[in-house]
Image (spheres, rainbow, N blue to C red):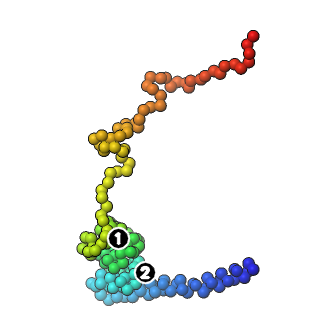
């Protein structure tokens, strides 16, 4: 029975292997297509990236990598490629940014600036111009107090120890010597005559 189960699971893995690689092969072919299209006309790199990602959102990482490599993109162009990719696939926001930084680490600050533009609403709900999209129900977060602050009325009337103080009352009152610990002598339990 155990051998039958092992053989059945092994056969299932071999049968599912081509299905799992189908997406990988398509993404590799797509990245090669993007590389050749960008090499043919590098001035249309943003349009190529937008069109390919709109058609194949799951291959956004490979498309971004291929576009950056094929166009020999500078920092600003990497940021524009990331921006175009995120506009087409906002659900792949983090993956697109990570792939771009992996290929062009020197453009990390530029990619981070683009990422922050979209990350304000969790990567969704933004238009191409950077504002909230029409019909978006994303509400910007309200600035709140620091959770590490003491509770109470803020800096005017805080509850708790003063900021910068040692944190409350000491365990022993001031003035007691700390040379030795107090020792209590128990009473004798044997009767004395």
- Residue that carries the numbered disc 2 in the rendered image: 58
- Residue that carries the numbered disc 1 in the rendered image: 123
The answer to whether 7 appears left or right of 61 in the picture is right
Query: Element at badge 1?
Result: loop
Q: Quadrant of residue 71?
A: bottom left
Measured as percent of width and height from the top left, residue 128 is found at: 27, 75
- Report how far apart the C-alphas of labels 1 and 2 lie in the structure: 16 Å
Name which residue lies at 69% across and 80% down. 6
* Disc 2 residue crowd, few under 14, some 14–19, many 20+, Cα 10 Å: some
Name which residue lies at 30% across and 58% down. 142
- Say which of 81 and 172 sits in front: 172
The answer to whether 82 appears left or right of 16 in the picture is left
Q: Quadrant of residue 105?
A: bottom left
Query: Element at badge 2?
Result: helix
Measured as percent of width and height from the top left, residue 42 is found at: 30, 84
Which label belongs to residue 174? none
Name which residue lies at 60% across and 86% down. 15
Name which residue lies at 43% across and 25% down. 174
Q: Is residue 166 above or below residue 62?
A: above
* Disc 1 residue crowd, few under 14, some 14–19, many 20+, Cα 10 Å: some
Report if the CB atoms under discs 1 and 2 are less than 8 Å apart: no
Would you say residue 80 is visible in this rendering?
yes
């Amino acid at each position: 029975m155990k051998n039958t189960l092992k053989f059945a699971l092994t056969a299932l893995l071999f049968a599912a292997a081509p299905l799992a690689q189908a997406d990988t092969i398509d993404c590799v072919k797509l990245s090669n297509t993007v590389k050749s299209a960008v090499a043919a006309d590098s001035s249309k790199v943003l349009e190529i990236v937008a069109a390919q990602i709109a058609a194949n959102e799951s291959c956004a990482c490979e498309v971004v990598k291929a576009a950056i490599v094929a166009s020999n993109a500078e920092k600003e162009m990497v940021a524009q490629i990331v921006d175009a990719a995120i506009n087409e696939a906002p659900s792949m926001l983090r993956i697109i940014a990570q792939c771009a930084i992996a290929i062009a680490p020197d453009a990390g600050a530029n990619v981070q600036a683009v990422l922050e533009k979209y990350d304000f609403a969790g990567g969704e709900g933004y238009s191409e111009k950077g504002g909230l999209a029409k019909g978006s129900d994303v509400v910007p977060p309200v600035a709140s107090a620091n959770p590490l602050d003491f509770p109470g009325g803020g800096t005017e009337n805080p509850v708790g120890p003063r900021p910068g103080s040692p944190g409350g009352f000491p365990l022993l009152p001031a003035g007691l010597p700390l040379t030795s610990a107090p020792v209590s002598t128990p009473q004798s339990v044997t009767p004395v005559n």
